[in-house]
Image (cartoon, grey):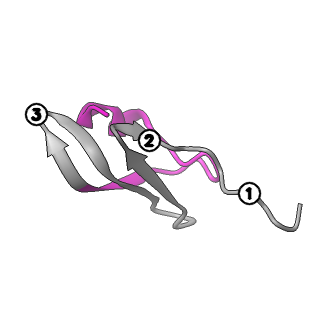
Amino acid sequence: MRKEIIKILCCPVCKTDLTVSIEKEEDNDIITGTLTCNSCHTVYPIKDGIPDLLPPENPEG
């Protein structure tokens, strides 16, 4: 995932900004890490350069 993409991503749950935590980086690509919502604090993993922005399943729904 390119670092520049972070600027246009938002939390799919509450639509607010995300903060990135980089574990592994190559060139200008984030290989592994997490994206965390600044509002609802939902954490989305980045694995093999791909952010998983699927909202968490709601066990009550």
Query: Toward the viewer: 52 or 13?
Result: 52
Magenta stretch in the rendered image: 1-22
Of helix, strand and loop, which one carries label 3? loop
Could you tell me the amino acid type at mark 1? Glu
Which of the marked residues, 2 or 3, is nearer the chain's N terminus? 3
58 to 7, vertically: above or below:
below
Quadrant location of the N terminus in the rendered image? top left
Decide if residue 36 is on the left or right side of residue 60.
Answer: left
> Disc 2 versus disc 1: distance between alpha carbons?
17 Å
Which of the marked residues, 1 or 3, is nearer the chain's N terminus? 3
Contact (CB < 8 A) between labels 2 and 1? no
56 to 12, vertically: above or below:
below
* Mark 1: few/some/many CA within 10 Å (<14, 14-19, 20+): few
Residue at (78, 61) in percent of width and height:
58
Could you tell me the amino acid type at mark 3? Asp
Q: Is 61 in the magenta? A: no
Query: Toward the viewer: 51 or 39?
Result: 51
Of helix, strand and loop, which one carries label 1? loop
Residue occupying the far left of the picture: 27
Which of the marked residues, 2 or 1, is nearer the chain's N terminus? 2
* Percent position of residue 38, x then y: 45, 62
* Percent position of residue 34, x then y: 38, 56
User: Any mark on residue 27, and which?
Assistant: 3
According to the image, label 2 marks what residue?
51
According to the image, label 1 marks what residue?
57
